[in-house]
Amino acid sequence: MSAKKETLSVIIPACNEAGNIGPMARALRQIMERERIDAAVYFVDDGSTDGTWEQILAAAGEWEMVRGIRFSRNFGKEAAIFAGLEMAAGDCCGVMDCDMQHPPETLVEMYRLWENGYEVIEGVKEDRGRESLIYKGMTALFYKLMSAAVRQDMSRASDFKLLDRKAVDALVSLPERDTFFRALSGWVGYKTASVGFKVQERAEGESKWTTFGLIKYAVNNILSFTTKPLYLVAGMGVLFLILALVQGIESIVTYATHRAVEGFTTVILIELIIGSVVMLSLGIIGGYVAKIYEEVKGRHRYIVSTTVGIPARRERRDDPV
Ligand code: UDP
Ligand code: MG
């Protein structure tokens, strides 16, 4: 550990990015030295199986401002971001991807805004890069729900951000473990600015997201950020009560006027509709119950196996519960 000043901590979650660590560290070093920014880079190895950690060690050997945190297994990008935020020592923290999709020049732009007094600087996607049609449709739906939940436009939000120490401290003090960094940075408030950037092509390897993974991620974040679906369930209950009353009156009238018997179609339809609505509602409620269960267990967000370049006092001792 060197005594060099660290004003900006750059946090980079990395899962199987062996080919990207070296170029990323070199690119950042070059640009930070050129811009005279005292920066340290925190690579968080999120359970990689491809020699990412060895690359981080090599990068730390080349440049004393490289730090590394290695998880005991894959805990996900959110956990990696929060581990970095918890261990960073800088007066501000930048978070960016390991695959060069977030241009380092934009990080410098964000840093300049921070120097001018902004406390939360959001990277906003000017275009979304290349995405398939189905992916576009699904993300549009997800962002509509999320935007309503956090009352700000999320459609172009990204995890590429720069936060002042105050915002970082506020974030890491949150007790919840299932976090959604992208929206939480806006939730903490503070003086906010945004910087547009063009999503670059991934440098090496491929995106780790599967369709199922993305759906899970979307549902999880909606459950974390809004309880609106629960009210939707109550709303459906009221709607069906009204329909039941109408249908009830109708069948009594039919019975009284001796015109009953026929109408099995109606019965079948009602059974089907009510059945599916009840199941859907149970599912939504179950989602929240599961969420409560996960949070109540209070397990650590991640477990660190080793670190490099980080003084022991800052390292969180995360023993499994
Ligand atoms: N990542 C991670 N843990 C994971 C998945 C991804 O730390 O379980 C990192 C990954 O190494 C990269 C960033 O998160 O730095 C974004 O991942 P990716 O490029 O696969 O996602 P996309 O850009 O397609 O959203
Ligand atoms: Mg990427």
Image (cartoon, rainbow, N blue to C red):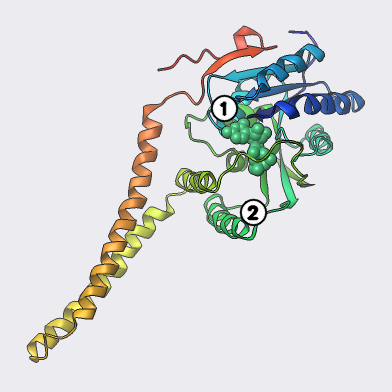
Tell me if residue 310 comes above or below residue 233 in the rendering.
above
> How many numbered callouts?
2
Q: Where is ligand 1, by quadrant?
A: top right
Mark linked to residue 172:
1
Alpha carbon of mark 2 to alpha carbon of mark 1: how far?
A: 25 Å
Tell me if residue 66 comes above or below residue 197 in the rendering.
above
Other-residue count near label 2 (Cα within 10 Å), few / some / many at <14 / 14–19 / ≥20: some
Q: Amino acid under label 1? A: Val
Would you say 302 lies left or right of 108 here?
left
- Give how far across and how far down residue 211 sits, in percent: 54, 48
- Give how far across and how far down residue 297 sits, in percent: 37, 28
Would you say 63 lies left or right of 56 here?
right
- Give how far across and how far down residue 13 sits, in percent: 65, 29
- Secondary structure, mark 2, is loop
Q: Is residue 77 visible?
A: no
Other-residue count near label 1 (Cα within 10 Å), few / some / many at <14 / 14–19 / ≥20: some
Q: Amino acid under label 2? A: Ser
Write the residue at 80% across / 33% down.
Answer: 111
The foreground one among 129 and 206 is 206
- Give how far across and how far down residue 55 sits, in percent: 72, 19
Quarter of the view holding residue 131: bottom right
Write the residue at 88% across / 25% down.
Answer: 30
Would you say 239 lies left or right of 94 here?
left
Quadrant placement of the C terminus: top left
Quarter of the view holding residue 39: top right
- Secondary structure, mark 1, is helix
Which callout, 2 or 1, points at the residue further toward the start of the chain?
2
State the residue position of label 2: 155
